[in-house]
Image (spheres, coloured by chain):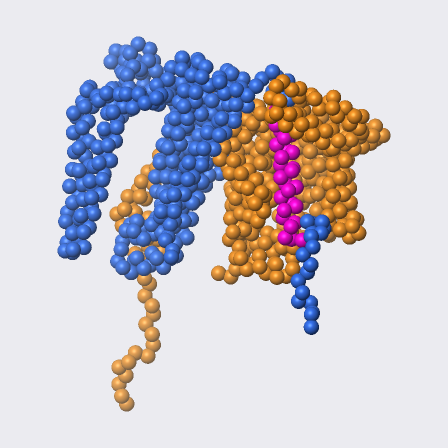
């Protein structure tokens, strides 16, 4: 019987020392590790303390309602916290809320922008969640409820509310049963939004839609029988006849060229309206083409249906920011992709033109582009052309962000391995098939962060339109509010409010891009 | 035995212009050229017609006419009797000075914030994240206007500084040398009692005193570089690094101090006299607001670039440096940052470009930069939109191209040399 010297059971593990676990360890490790870190922490804590102690009384004494001027606010703060206390005056936001959101849009028509804004998300649903039934129907439902709440808030319970409820119920059902149906909304939305926002005859947007449908129909029917080239030519012809005035455009152009050349040789006084006398024959046809206004007028005469027209100078506030932001974002991406492809093209001329365009636009500030829209466009367009200011600004902002998008997409294209292009060639795909099926899906995936940050930049830059006389929320509306004698001397509150909304939208966009990046990540690293 | 190896007949058919990929690109390019030429012709024709209708011509002669307006902040001598062209140059200088100061300050601040955001210190990292997100996601215009409004609304009027019975309502800052009123900032200005002469080259007055100071500082820096090089050579030869910090301090400080002393440097302090401050340098709030807002905003953007650059460096690098026994600070400055620099510089170039272009937002606070002079007052006075806008865009374009050329050259010099 030997004595056992070896322990048979394990000792229970001891708890780590207090300094190596729990809150104390975390604090020591994350806040006070070494003298430098300690100084940093103390400095940060001091900054935080200063910020909070400066702003807290101001926030806590804030007046949220029941004041219609700065004097009311000051009185309310003095009653609440003593004569020397400072307090925020959020009541201003409450009073000026409609102006910040809608600008000068007539109050009885507020239901139109609200409904359009709601439908925007329905139109975006197929893009945001391709074929994800539950997500799409949830989105439609939630947006519908919010839209109805906003409508009731703006307008009371009215006919439009019932209409909206029915519309969103139908859309939610469609999303739940057959999500593809929502693509129709996506296709119609641009025309619908234009009509809802500006009003006028319904037949204008419908005839434009019919024109596009006609072009698509021509391509689809002609392409199998006549081949791609003939179909393209036919489509261009159909488009031209429907939307443009080819005869007088060609005549004007020809006259312009003749004049221009003539002016080189003669260099004496030549007459710019020479065109009219030389090509006078063409003028009768001008009344017939383009077809689109004729069609829309004929329909309007048969079955008149109008929404009250709202002029562009009534747009303002966040409504304006969203109109410019959304339309420029949606047009600038395809344009940017085309420019990027042009820049990487083998064709010398296409490449040169793309590079020149992109570098020029990226080399000048957006403000100069906006001033071009408001000052110079009147020189570049035919005389007596009337061109809506919002439309002009949208076009210039679109061009601006298209150039930036082009550079981002070019980065994505450059990042693709050469093998992808070669594989597409080896499969016998032509240029557009290869781009559509192989190159773009990968290149765009790589460029998502860059594209979204261009979009964020664009949305922030919509504030610059105030310099050409539009009432954007940041400078336009806030200046109006601050010029009001009742709100004289208010400055923190409007800027904080506007900044907070911009922050929400931009931060939301950047988070969505991170979600998308994660969702599309297919490499297993 | 003649099978399908025979090459196709080289006869050119018209259809090949469309269906043969060898010729199709020419067809497309010709069509593009025609369309482009037509477009340009259309625009040119419209412009000519419109100009004729308004009874105008394209003429840059107005640049030599009297400008007739004042610009408070002018780096080259300017009075309202000078020409529009000189006003343009003054505006360009104002644009460039804001761009330069903004680039330098935002780079310094951005690198600090970017590095601190990756710090292991929980509080500091969170604070920096909040800073970056707030500044990045709110329009720059808001920061410019807000800073300007806060300066001009919260500060007292100049008369509040008037000393009545030994006290004044408002106090000056920094030991009574800086006065911030609602109209501007009055700061001390360096003066020389016996300066070197000033002479003019064309339109630019060149101050020899300033040149002398710059030359002496550059010389000291070069001497210091030589000293460090010699020290390094000594260290490599003998293994002992001589202590040189006091020599560096002497070389860098003594010559310039001696020069300034010889020229009789003294400060001209702003003093309240009559109704306003006299003496010193008055800096308008528009300049301050624009500079501060650009710095804070672009610091957040640059911080993100710096963070991305640092995170792009493989973790093995910092582990290797830790294995060599380098402290975290030395790891950052000797191992991580030099490598991260190569990732950081290309996006940094485009941020400098954006900053330079965004100086045009000075319009919001009436800062008279290139856009304010040439594209603002000159344009309104002369009514020559086409000429002013074209010239302004051209100048911005040239400035952008120069900045990107310089930065690209720098990028090429620090790039990893691969053979």
> Could one spot residue A335 in this view of the protein?
yes
Placement of B143 over or under A35, stated as above or below: above
Q: In the rendered image, what is the letter of the chain coloured orange?
A: A
Q: Position of residue A150 (x, y in %)?
A: 64, 35
Residue at 15 percent across and 47 percent down: it is B243
Residue reaching furthest to the top: B274
Colour blue, chain:
B
Quadrant of the drawing holding the N terminus of chain A: bottom left
Residue B107, placed above or below residue B385: below
Question: In the rendered view, would you say A488 is above or below B16?
Answer: above
Residue A434 spot, x, y in % from top left = 62, 55
The reply, left or right, for residue A51 in relation to residue A354 is left
Query: For the point 52% across and 51% down, which residue is it?
Result: A414
Instruction: Decide whether the magenta segment is chiefly helix, strand or loop.
Output: helix
Horizontally, is A343 left or right of A7 in the view?
A: right
Which residue occupies the foreground of this view, A195 or B74? Answer: B74
Q: Which residues are magenta?
A: B20-48
Q: Residue at x 26, y 85 (%)?
A: A3
Query: Where residue B236 sits in the image (x, y, percent)?
Result: 18, 55
């Amino acid at each position: 019987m030997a004595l056992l010297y070896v322990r048979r059971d394990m000792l229970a593990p001891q708890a780590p020392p207090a300094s190596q676990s729990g809150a104390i360890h975390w604090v020591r490790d994350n806040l006070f590790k070494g003298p430098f870190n300690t100084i940093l922490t103390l400095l940060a804590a001091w900054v935080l303390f200063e910020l909070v102690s400066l702003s807290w009384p101001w926030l806590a004494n804030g007046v949220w309602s029941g004041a219609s001027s700065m004097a009311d606010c000051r009185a309310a703060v003095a009653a609440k916290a003593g004569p020397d206390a400072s307090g925020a005056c959020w009541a201003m936001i409450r009073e000026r809320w409609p102006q910040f959101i809608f600008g000068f849009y007539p109050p009885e028509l507020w239901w139109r922008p609200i409904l359009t804004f709601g439908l925007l998300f329905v139109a975006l649903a197929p893009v945001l969640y391709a074929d994800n039934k539950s997500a799409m129907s949830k989105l439609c439902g939630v947006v519908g409820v919010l839209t109805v709440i906003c409508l009731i808030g703006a307008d009371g319970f009215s006919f439009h509310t019932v209409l909206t409820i029915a519309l969103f119920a139908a859309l939610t059902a469609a999303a739940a049963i057959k999500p593809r149906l929502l693509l129709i909304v996506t296709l119609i939305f641009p025309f619908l939004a234009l009509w809802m926002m500006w009003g006028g005859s319904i037949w204008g947007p419908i005839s434009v839609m019919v024109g596009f449908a006609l072009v698509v129909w021509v391509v689809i029917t002609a392409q199998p029988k006549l081949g791609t080239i003939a179909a393209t030519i036919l489509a261009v012809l159909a488009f031209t006849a429907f939307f443009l005035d080819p005869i007088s455009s060609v005549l004007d152009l020809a006259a312009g060229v003749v004049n221009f050349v003539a002016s080189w040789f003669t260099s004496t006084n030549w007459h710019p309206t020479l065109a009219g006398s030389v090509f006078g024959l063409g003028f009768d046809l001008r009344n017939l083409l383009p077809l689109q206004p004729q069609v829309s007028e004929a329909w309007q005469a048969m079955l008149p249906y109008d929404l009250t027209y709202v002029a562009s100078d009534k747009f303002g506030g966040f409504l304006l920011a969203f109109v410019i932001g959304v339309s420029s974002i949606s047009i600038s991406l395809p344009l940017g992709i085309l420019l990027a492809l042009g820049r990487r093209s083998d064709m010398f001329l296409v490449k040169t033109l793309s590079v020149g365009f992109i570098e020029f636009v990226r080399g000048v500030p957006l403000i100069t582009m906006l001033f071009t829209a408001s000052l110079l466009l009147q020189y570049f367009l035919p005389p007596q052309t009337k061109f809506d200011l919002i439309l002009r600004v949208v076009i210039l902002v679109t061009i601006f962000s298209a150039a930036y998008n082009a550079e981002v997409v070019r980065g994505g294209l450059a990042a693709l391995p050469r093998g992808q292009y070669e594989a597409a060639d080896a499969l016998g795909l032509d240029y557009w098939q290869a781009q559509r099926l192989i190159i773009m899906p990968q290149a765009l995936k790589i460029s998502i962060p860059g594209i979204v940050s261009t979009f964020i930049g664009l949305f922030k830059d919509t504030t610059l339109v105030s310099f050409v006389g539009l009432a954007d929320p940041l400078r336009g509306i806030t200046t109006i509010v601050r010029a009001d004698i009742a709100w004289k001397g208010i400055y923190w509150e409007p800027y904080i409010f506007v900044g907070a909304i911009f922050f929400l939208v931009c931060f939301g966009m950047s988070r969505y891009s991170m979600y998308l990046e994660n969702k599309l990540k297919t490499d297993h690293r | 035995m003649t099978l399908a190896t025979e090459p196709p007949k080289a006869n050119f058919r018209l259809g090949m212009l469309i269906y043969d990929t060898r010729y199709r690109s020419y067809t497309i390019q010709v069509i593009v050229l025609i369309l482009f030429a037509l477009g340009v012709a259309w625009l040119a024709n419209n412009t000519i017609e419109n100009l004729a209708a308004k009874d105008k011509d394209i003429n840059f002669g107005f640049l030599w006419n009297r400008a007739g307006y004042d610009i408070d902040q002018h780096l080259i001598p300017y009075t309202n009797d000078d020409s529009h062209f000189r006003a343009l140059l003054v505006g360009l200088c104002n644009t460039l000075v804001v761009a330069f100061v903004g680039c330098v300050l935002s780079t310094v601040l951005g690198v600090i914030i970017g590095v601190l955001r990756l710090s292991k210190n929980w509080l500091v990292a969170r604070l920096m994240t909040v800073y970056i997100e707030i500044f990045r996601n709110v329009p720059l215009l808001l920061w410019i206007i807000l800073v300007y409004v806060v300066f001009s609304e919260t500060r007292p009027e100049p008369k509040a500084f008037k000393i009545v019975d030994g006290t004044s309502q408002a106090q000056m800052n920094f030991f009574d040398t800086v006065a911030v009123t609602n109209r501007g900032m009055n700061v001390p200005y360096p003066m020389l009692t016996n300066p070197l002469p000033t002479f003019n080259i064309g339109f630019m007055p060149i101050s020899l005193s300033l040149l002398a100071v710059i030359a002496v500082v550059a010389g000291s820096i070069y001497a210091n570089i030589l000293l460090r090089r010699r020290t390094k050579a000594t260290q490599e030869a003998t293994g002992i690094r001589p202590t040189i910090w006091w020599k560096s301090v002497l070389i860098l400080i003594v010559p310039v101090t001696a020069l300034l002393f010889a020229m009789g440097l003294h400060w001209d302090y702003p003093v309240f006299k009559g109704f306003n401050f006299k003496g010193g340098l008055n800096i308008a709030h528009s300049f301050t607001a624009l500079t501060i807002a650009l710095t804070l905003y672009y610091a957040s953007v640059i911080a993100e670039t710096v963070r991305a650059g640092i995170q792009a460096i493989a973790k093995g690098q910092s582990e290797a440096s830790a294995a060599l026994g380098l402290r975290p600070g030395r790891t950052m400055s000797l191992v991580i940052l030099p490598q991260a620099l190569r990732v950081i510089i290309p996006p940094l170039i485009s941020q400098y470009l954006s900053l330079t272009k965004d100086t045009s937002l000075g319009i919001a606070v009436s800062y008279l930069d290139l856009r304010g002079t040439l594209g603002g007052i000159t344009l309104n006075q002369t009514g020559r939109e086409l000429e002013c806008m074209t010239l302004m865009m051209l100048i911005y374009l040239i400035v952008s191209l120069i900045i990107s050329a310089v930065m690209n050259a720098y990028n090429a010099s620090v790039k990893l040399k691969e053979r």
